[in-house]
Amino acid sequence: MGKILGRYVLREVVSAWLVSMLVLLIILTAFEVSAVLERAAASQFPQGVILRLIYLGLLQYVSLVAPMALLLGIVWAFGRLYHDSEMAAALACGVRPATLYGPVIGFGVVIAAALAAVTLILAPSATYQALALRDRAIRAGQFAPLRPGQFRSFGGGSAVVYAQTVEPDGTLENVFLERNRGPVAQVVVAAQARHTVSPNGRTQTIELYDGERFDGIPGSAKFRIMRFAEHTVPIPMPAAHEVVTDLDAAPTAALYASSEPSHQAKLQWRIALPLMCLMLAIIALPLSRLAPRQGRYARIWLAVVVYLVYMNLLSAGEIWLAQGRIPLYLGLWWVHGVMALLVLAITGVPGTTQRVRRRWAHA
């Protein structure tokens, strides 16, 4: 009977974890889609890279979502079991708590192991691919030919160009150009223009013919107006990152071999997330106990608070470790100890206090 109950509890936990994971991923997907579309519109990303950027971004979020989903899933599942008196009936029949909790801890170990593979291997690779793909998409969008009737940004958004028509030979007709040079805004309108790119790809040039140029500070009445027969506007391109240097994209082996505090802090962060997942699975068991007549969702808010405190301590610890304010040998291990003591205080002290009070009253 114990094995049957263990599988039943595990099924409840896995179902609740899947639902929590799905809901959190849907929320994060909405934010990621919005961010990617905003960058794509600003930099004219090719359409083929948008879905891939969204996928790579979500893969980086899995390491943050999985621990919270596991904590909420366990608290949610056991909250229902306590609320429906199923836990009380199982324990009254002589079922040991280890029989019910063992499969859940095993499931937490499996999730932590899978999360370790994500944080140590998959997430850095996904970050590298996302940054490299984003850089190539920006360059591809910047070097794409102008389209008639569409505004186009250049130089990382430093200039905006519009052409009413584009002739087959590349000549632009009825051209509008706007760029900012510090507080001064520069607006140019011309009858014709041509768009060229330097051989090294570092500068794009707009050659305008038969037009006017307006220089001034927005909100000020002072403007300078110039008429020209030919005017050349060079637009420097942002530096291309052929090699991604973002620390989140660095391989775990490279971080391990480095003695830089910032590299060691990032390595400790990647190790801490799977340990956090396992710790939250253990913490969730006493956290999910309900008193009689408590609602099944009574401990959800407390689980969210525990997760936020845990995550903020890890984030602060990573910053302190990178700054050298915490010795490397201490790393982020102290955060796990603090959380264990905090949850023991939350869940153990009230019960111990009540038992002492009952014994004192009985005496």
Image (cartoon, rainbow, N blue to C red):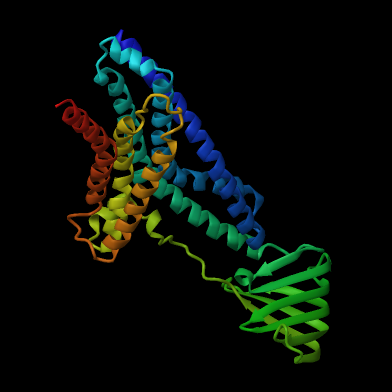
Q: Quadrant of residue 80?
A: top left
Residue 134: give x, y in percent of width and height.
Answer: 54, 56
Work out whether residue 8 or residue 136 is closer to the camera in this orientation and state it: 8
In the visual, does 236 lie left or right of 323? right
Q: Residue, x 18% and y 32% (percent of image)? A: 356
Query: Which quadrant of the rendered structure holds the C terminus?
Result: top left
Q: Quadrant of residue 152?
A: bottom right
Residue 352 to residue 172: above or below? above
Q: Residue, x 63% and y 62% (percent of image)? A: 43
Residue 361: give x, y in percent of width and height.
Answer: 19, 29
Residue 180 to residue 166: above or below? below
Work out whether residue 315 or residue 113 is closer to the camera in this orientation and state it: 315
Query: Which quadrant of the rendered structure holds the N terminus?
Result: top left
Residue 7: give x, y in percent of width and height.
Answer: 36, 15
Q: Residue, x 74% and y 71% (percent of image)? A: 161
Work out whether residue 148 or residue 84 is closer to the camera in this orientation and state it: 84
